[in-house]
Image: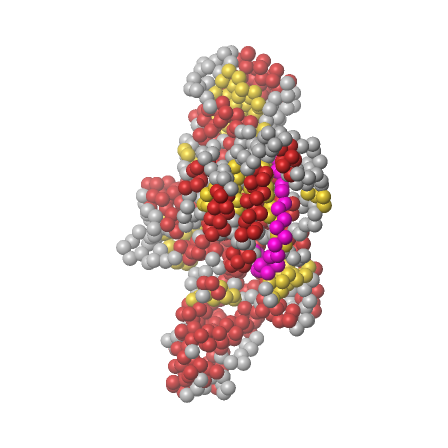
Amino acid sequence: MSLSKLLESKGFQLIDSQYTSDLYSDTAQETGIILDTRLYGTDKPKFPYHEYTGWQNALMHKFSKLYRFIDDQEPDNKWLVDTVLGESDDEYDFQQYGTDRHINEIDPTRPEYNFESLFEQVYGSRYLYALEREHQYIDLRGKSRYVDYMLKTRHGDIAIELNGEAFHHPLVIDRKRYLSQLLKQNSLMKDGIKVYRWSNAGMADEKKFADQIRLYFGNTESFCEKPSASQFRNISFSLFKHQKDALSEIQNSREAGKDTFLLVLPTGTGKTEVFIADHDRQRKLGLAKRGLVIVPFKELRDQTKSRFVERNSCLNMSSDITDLKADVIVQTTQAIQRHFSSLPSDHFDYIVVDEAHHAPAQGLKRVLQHFKPKTLLGCTATDKRLDQKDLAEIFGRYRLNMTLEEAIKQHLLPPIRAFRLESNIDFSQVRFNGKEFVKSDLNNNVIIPSRDQLIVDVISKYFGQEDTTTRQSLSSLQGVIFCVDVRHANRLATLLNKNKISAEAVSANSREGLKKYKEGKLRFLCACDLLNEGWDAPNTSIIVMARPTMSKVLYMQQLGRGTRNHPGKEALYVVDVVDSYGPALQPWSLHSIFNLTDYKPFADVFNPNAAPVGEEIVLDHLYESVRNLKPIKLFNFEDEFGDYVNDEQLARELFVSTGTVKKWVKNLSVVPDKQLPFGNKMLNYYKQSRVHEIREEKNLKLRSEATRREDFFEFLEQRDYTFSFKIIFLLLMLKHADKTGEVSLTLLRDDYQSFYKDLLTKYGKSEKPNSPLNNEEFLNDKSRLTKSILQNPFEKFERKSFMYHAKDLDKLAFDAVLWDKLESSDIELIRIQMFEDGDDYFYKYIERNTLLADSEFF
């Protein structure tokens, strides 16, 4: 039986198609299933990957559950269909699939960096902590997989995959890889986790992407905004010959304050009896009300449950980790990994990991970091050599909800010592576009010899020579200097080498220095862009911020290069180059990031009054004057503008165009609460409370994304036609719109031009008198015609937030929320109205025989 027939037998109906795929839905419109029915045929159509992901994302949001399958009867595909639709509950032994890029590659890929930056622009930097990068997940076959981002919310997790076309487009990759991709996606959906995908092309239209994630992710009220760090358990690692020895040592260690135990018992000595006996003892003391035993295989699961019951028949045993009535839950590794994140960290008082030597390979690290039981016990009877360091790392570490500052204060990460290098160079002409400094302005203003020499002089003085008093030197420390561009990186590397400090510039096209740096053969890297290099260098002790930035994402990523622990590393030294940007704006610095208002050169930023020790004593002598704690005036963009909205955000709240808001400001009917200069223009900001005030002043109806469809039809019902432009424009938008509601401006303009030229040829006029479209010269000027379309009619739709112009992509597009709400029947109703209104218009002003419905243009 074909999959389409199978779905029909289960009550699903075909409701839509796109390129190589068909969409089926159940009668309640709760579950959607996409079948790739024509993907491997000889006449398969070509299509851009962003349309594939765009259609799927829209459906993912629409349905409670959405699955996708290849429509064939191959055994591996049939198994996936049966499993997802609930006809198979087979368990598979754990397998590793893919790698944890978070370990091997600190830096995000280019799509990941773009996603983080756009996410920050939409939701603010404080909510970046809700994103967990490289989230480990166990699929339906027991394979360990990694999700690019998991958005952590109080209502459940949302998976985000950022895909390159060469590795994910089903027309590019082979069937095996595509099926693996579907297995991962369907496994997540089976567990109630929706999956949204974007490529770089899908994020290129920033306005559309922003609207999409607002729609798909919702508001920030449910986001988890506090970051997590790690803490270590008090762990005991012991080898025993007998059960009694093990039980005695566990109790002695527990009384000594330890709560985590790794036991190695020879085969045949009854390791299972040890943890059953210890659990029984703790349960009687009221310290093990709910226990969990994690085993590698399902056969061992059933055996372990039987052994518990043999010892105590009164125990309520279960394999359902959500069973609140169970005394002890025994479950396999893969089952636990798929469901553990839905449970609170204190859900279990007592956790056992049987066959603990499998834990590193099976990826139990995240599970054990999540839970904080009163007792954590790992047991093994293997005679193989154990990697105690690896096991201690997995069993001994758990997650804390704490900030970077809290982790440093608790000595979990090295302290940070700061030096503010004040250049006194005037950068007030460097423009800020509301998101970041303009790159061309940075190139023209930041890359100047005197500033570069200041940076090199500081490095040479404090990290390049010996202190004559203590006879000590910090000249072995390594560091990274973050630069504006390749030219800047090359200049600084050349200057450092001239001062006998080894350095190399690194970029996407020059990676040779990375290997030498990690091997300790190079002291400094001058980097302009390490975002897709994928490197980890915990030996980094110095970070120089030579590139000013208003992106908190970028600053924190750069800072993160040095916050890792490393043998012999006493502290991380951060040199912030502080230039003069005028009173209204300053780029991020270490002190503004942590809102620190006092500064002492080279002191621990979180404990500046502490007596100098170690390397700080050397720096104290090299400083050549008294290092006093002094107040500094900070500019923190997040604090200053975090609760304000800009022109674009105000327009979105009021459901008008950005151009409308700018007109209000220009004619002084609306006065911004704050302004920032941007070249010869101003960036405007408004308090949140002003949104309601301005809506009342302008007599605007309260609108929301929920009312967008009704608002659009209300707008069309007004039938406000000074000219025919709006009618023809909307018909062409509907004609050329792709699955995501986008239209090529060039294509639309050409059809628009041809339609009116055809009228002009047939009737000697194409519009009312005085219309420029009656002028053949004007119609032939494509540049003027494009400008005319954007001014009227497009602006009428843009003003109401029904459409927008993606200038960089040369596209016009329906608002993402509106397009998502428009059904095919709605589009047909709009076409019918436009045909009727157009016929009435042209009957009145041109020719009674003009019937738009019969026109070849629509």
Snapshot quadrant of residue 326: top right
Membership of 708 in magenta stretch: no
Q: Is residue 608 above or below residue 666?
A: above
Residue 8 x, y percent position in the rendering? 39, 51
Q: Name the residue furthest left.
A: 42
Residue at 57% across, 33% down:
466
Viewed as shown, does residue 79 lie left or right of 290? left
**In front of the other: 735 or 482:** 482
Snapshot quadrant of residue 663: bottom right
**In front of the other: 562 or 266:** 562
How many numbered discs sit on the rendered protein? Answer: 0
Residue at 60% across, 66% down:
681
Residue 615 x, y percent position in the rendering? 61, 32
Q: Is residue 43 above or below residue 161?
A: below
* Coloration mode: secondary structure
Membership of 416 in magenta stretch: yes
Viewed as shown, does residue 111 lie left or right of 281? left
**In front of the other: 429 or 278:** 429
Q: Is residue 230 visible?
A: no
Viewed as shown, does residue 67 lie left or right of 707? left
Residue at 40% across, 73% down:
750
Residue 532 x, y percent position in the rendering? 45, 46
Residue at 67% across, 54% down:
640
Residue extent of the magenta highlight: 412-436
